[in-house]
Amino acid sequence: MSYLSSREIDGLNVDQRKSRLVELREEMLQLRAQQALGGSSSDSGSYKATRRSIARLLSKMNEDSKE
């Protein structure tokens, strides 16, 4: 669930984007906690993918708000 493509973001409305952002931030919090506690490194790419998905989502939201 952590990866969110640009096409998926374009298909979401404003409320869906906000709720998805909350979900991604919660997931990021869990990943940070797991990493701090020395959790499993089997899913190390999910941290990076979640972070990039959040950035992609915020960029699109800011772009839409300027229009």
Image (cartoon, rainbow, N blue to C red):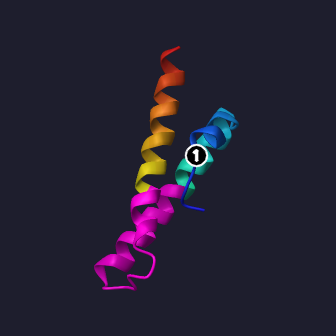
Residue 44 at what x, y percent from top left? 40, 73
Q: Nearer the viewer, residue 55 or 45?
A: 45
Residue furthest to the top in view is 67
Q: What stretch is highlighted in magenta?
A: 24-50
Q: Nearer the viewer, residue 21 or 38?
A: 38
Residue at left offset 45%, top offset 33% = 59
> Residue beneath label 1, please?
5
Q: Nearer the viewer, residue 13 or 1?
A: 1
Residue type at mark 1: give it.
Ser
Total count of labels: 1
Residue 18 at what x, y percent from top left? 58, 42
Residue at left offset 48%, top offset 17% = 66
For this view, does 36 lie left or right of residue 7? left
Q: Decide whether the magenta segment is chiefly helix, strand or loop.
A: helix
Pointer 1 local density, CA inside 10 Å: few below 14, some 14–19, many at least 20: few
Residue 42 lies in magenta, yes or no?
A: yes
Seen in the picture, residue 66 relative to 40 is either above or below; the reply is above
Residue 15 at what x, y percent from top left? 66, 38
